[in-house]
Image: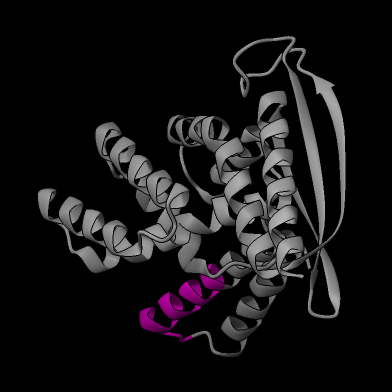
Amino acid sequence: MSASSCSRGSSTLLNACAVKNPEVDCTAEQSSSDGLLFFQRNCWLEKMQLHFTKDVLPDSVSTDFQNLNKFSEQQFLRLTEILFQFLLEPKETERFMQQLSEFAGEHGMSAGPLRNLMKSVLLVPQGALKKNLTAEQIKEDLVTLGLNEDKAAHFSQQWGEHYAALSRLAVRQTLMVNQLVDMEWKFGVTVGTSEVQKVGNIFLQLKLVVRKGNSTENVYMELTLPQFYNFLHEMERAKASMECFS
């Protein structure tokens, strides 16, 4: 159902109720208005198209992203720094929580709501890694969720800078607990993008097929040529170690 049809259907229903009960009081009118806004809001959430997930997100997620706009530039930069540090070192959960508590204390806010807000923000990079999203796609999703252009641009820039490291980390974590079934790669040359340092650089897109239970899942990553050769070297060392124990 589209947002327009949701709105039209709700308006008709409210008008019909008003005809049957013309002496409706202000409280009832306010309740009807709130109900209409809630209904339209849910329709908007269902219609919202995002790259990092196809699931319908809770209303609280978009609210959290809109609340991020209330932070100053310096505050947002610091929160982004804390978040990407955690993404690069996901085992440091205690440090992550401590940093958020310290941030909240420094700026006179409660730590609990800030932690919940950051949990919503984490949904984007975690989903983006699974779908191999570009910085531009990340930015589009953030703007769709309600973050302003400047903050979305900074976050997506950080994503572009850390993407290779995050991809390698995700692959290592995947291979630690899942069987590698197949691996494919293809080379490319950059012709013009804000996500790499130099035009003309050779890069490689890697696709890993891993077994999870009775099904398989594709894992993607993008590497520079030296990073790829280093990755192959690590894979060969791991294979040799396993053969020693077989």
Residue 144 in sight: no
- Up the image or down, 196 lies above or below 232; here it is above
Q: Residue at x 63, y 45 (%)?
A: 167
Q: Residue at x 37, y 60 (%)?
A: 117
Q: Nearer the viewer, residue 237 or 198?
A: 237
Tally of marks: 0
Q: Nearer the viewer, residue 115 or 175?
A: 175
Q: Main secondary structure of the magenta part?
A: helix
Q: Residue at x 46, y 86 (%)?
A: 23
Residue 36 position within the rendered picture, expressed as x and y whole percent measured from the top left: 55, 72
Asked if residue 212 lies left or right of residue 165, the reply is right
Residue 35 forms part of the magenta stretch: yes
- Up the image or down, 93 lies above or below 135; here it is below
Q: Residue furthest front?
A: 244
- Up the image or down, 156 lies above or below 167; here it is above
Work out which quarter of the rendered image holds the N terminus and state it.
bottom right
Q: How is the image coloured?
A: one colour
Q: Residue at x 11, y 49 (%)?
A: 106
Residue 236 position within the rendered picture, expressed as x and y whole percent measured from the top left: 74, 46
Residue 212 position within the rendered picture, expressed as x and y whole percent measured from the top left: 77, 73
Residue 220 in sight: yes
Residue 210 position within the rendered picture, expressed as x and y whole percent measured from the top left: 80, 63
Asked if residue 179 lies left or right of residue 100, the reply is right
Part of the protein shown in magenta: 23-38
Asked if residue 85 lies left or right of residue 210, the reply is left
Work out which quarter of the rendered image holds the C terminus and state it.
bottom right
Which quadrant holds residue 15?
bottom right
Q: Nearer the viewer, residue 125 or 67?
A: 125
Q: Residue furthest bottom?
A: 20
Asked if residue 246 lies left or right of residue 150, the reply is right
Residue 32 forms part of the magenta stretch: yes
